[in-house]
Image (cartoon, rainbow, N blue to C red):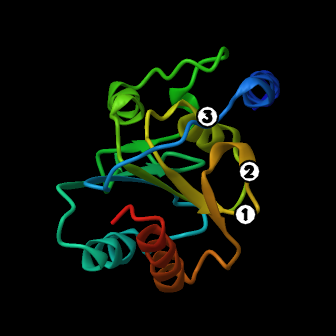
Amino acid sequence: MFSRIIKEFFLKKTIKKWLWEYNLEGSEGKINTVGVVVDATYFFDKEQLVSEIKSMSKDFKEIKILVYQDKMKGKNIEHELVFSIKDIGFGGKINKKVVQDFVDYPFDLLINYFDEEKIPLLLVSKMSKAKFKVGFSNVDARIHHFMLSMELNKYKEFVYESFKYLKILNKI
């Protein structure tokens, strides 16, 4: 318990420093690959979210989802791309290979589907090699290119509004 508090303190300090120096780059081109980062603490409809994203365009080659859980419950992992704060070292290094592979993959679009600033989620989003990042406005604006202000449980509206503006931006 105490080591977790210390770890979160140092990670928070590291992330804030990284975000202070972080500048988003613009992106061009159409969206073919989509990555989704979901906080499973408050949002449970991951499959419906992915199916809603798939329904927006038939051109997507790949959609990957990375799920964050505050507490891992033994071997009860419903999805192979699940991580927790235990998978992140003190200096912000990701220790789990599948999470590091997700971060290193150059997605055309990364959807950050979380509305609470949690250090592991901010770290994964910041370190992601995605070209365009979409998320909620309650989260630090420095990690998103585009933000929407709405409730977390309204995933259909979130996806609809996101893709409406992505079409306007000529990304789809």
Give amino acid for label 1: Ser
User: Where, by quadrant of the figure, is residue 154 drawn?
Assistant: bottom right
Q: Which residue is mark 2?
A: 141
- Left or right of 130? Residue 51 is left
Q: Are marks 2 and 1 in contact (CB under 8 Å)?
A: yes
Look at the picture and state if 40 lies above or below 83: below
Residue 123 bears which disc, if any?
3
Q: Amino acid at mark 3?
A: Leu
Q: Give the quadrant of the N terminus.
A: top right
Q: Which residue is mark 1?
A: 137
Q: Nearer the viewer, residue 64 or 22?
A: 22
Q: Residue at x 62, y 74 (%)?
A: 152
Q: Position of residue 148 (x, y in %)?
A: 65, 70
Mark 3 or mark 1: whose residue is earlier in sequence: 3
Using the numbered discs, state the Cα–Cα distance from disc 3 to disc 1 in whole angstroms.
17 Å
Mark closer to the observer (3, 1) = 1
Structural crowding at the residue carrying mark 2, measured as other residues with C-alpha within 10 Å and reported as few (<14), some (14–19) or many (≥20): few
Taking the image as shown, residue 136 lies to the left or right of residue 16, namely: left
Depicted 164 relative to depicted 70: above or below: below
Amino acid beneath label 2: Ala
Q: Secondary structure at mark 1?
A: loop
Residue 49 at x, y percent in the picture? 39, 73
| Residue 47 screen position, x and y as percent | 33, 71
Residue 57 lies in quadrant: bottom left
